Amino acid sequence: MELILCKNYDEISERGANIIARAMIDKPDCILGLATGSTPVGMYKRLIEMNRASWIDFSRTTTFNLDEYYPISPENSQSYRYFMNENLFNHVNIDKKNTYVPNGSAADAEAECKAYDAMIENSRGIDIQVLGIGINGHIGFNEPDENLITGTHLTALTESTIEANARFFDSKDEVPRHALTMGIGSIMRARKIILLASGKNKHDAVMKLLDGKLTTACPATMLKLHPDVILICDEAAYNG
Ligand code: GLP
């Protein structure tokens, strides 16, 4: 795992955006795996600026998002589909029909997960996967557990994740208790992975990424088995 240590959040956003921009320039029809949460927002802003300056072009880009709450309507302002439209897709020249987010309003969650995996498999595969990290080490919504799941699946959120994500909702009670998420296998199949971590509260999770151990109690540690992962973190996350 390569480490890029940044001074602050702005530098993380800049470094992350530069890596994605480089990939988009090298491969105009590249496939991006995208993440939600507050951490990638600055990077998305930077990508929007680059697109407006005509440095990068999204017209041939395809995206697959990691996860979505379940059940939730795509029109709900707390849905990850809405988040992606607001924070990136509405502001760049991407064709929305090439942007995929698991459907949180699918009647049959299992069928939706299978169809999502099939779509990724039938694509040319994810070139760069963007990840944030939960304070408990989750990636996507792959929560700490005895077993981790390889493919896209319906999962129950842990109490710690419900609490951490309550800041986006009017109250904790409104946070959905379940989500659809790509599995660890889907994430690990990406050719390249960049993981962004910012702030003191990510320190413990970041330290577990940098020690020599793998544990399902910190799902992000599985990334140590991937040949091309870049951890982009700020001093607060690194030093605690
Ligand atoms: C959510 C998302 C994750 C994200 C994590 C961290 O639970 N499912 O993909 O990485 O939160 O979010 P933040 O960046 O806001 O700390």
Image (cartoon, helix red, strand yellow):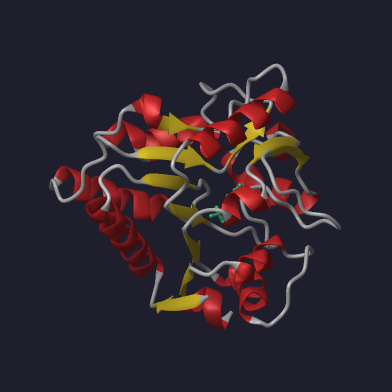
Q: Position of residue 222 (x, y in %)?
A: 67, 65
Q: Is residue 225 above or below residue 96?
A: below
Q: How far from the left and from the top, in percent, is residue 225?
A: 63, 69
Q: Residue furthest right?
A: 146
Q: Is residue 42 above or below residue 73?
A: below
* Residue at x-position 51% and y-position 54%: 190
Q: Tell me which corner region of the image, top left, top right, bottom left or bottom right, holds residue 117.
A: top right
Q: Residue at x 42, y 32 (%)?
A: 99
- Residue under the point 61% across and 66% down: 223
Q: Is residue 59 above or below residue 235?
A: above
**Nearest to the observer: residue 232 or residue 200:** 232
Task: Tell which of 25 and 71 is nearer to you.
Answer: 25
What x and y, as percent, mark residue 169?
61, 37
| Residue 29: quarter of image | top left
Q: How many marks?
A: 0
Drawn side of residue 130 relative to residue 50, left or right: right
In the image as oriented, which residue stretches furthest toward the left? Answer: 53
Horizontally, is 227 left or right of 110 in the view?
left
The image position of residue 75, as x and y in percent, is 51, 21
Compare residues 81 and 101 and report the one nearer the observer: 101
Q: Of 178 and 38, which appears nearest the observer?
A: 178
Identify the residue shown where x is 67% and y is 39%.
152
Looking at the rendered image, the quarter that the C terminus falls into is bottom right
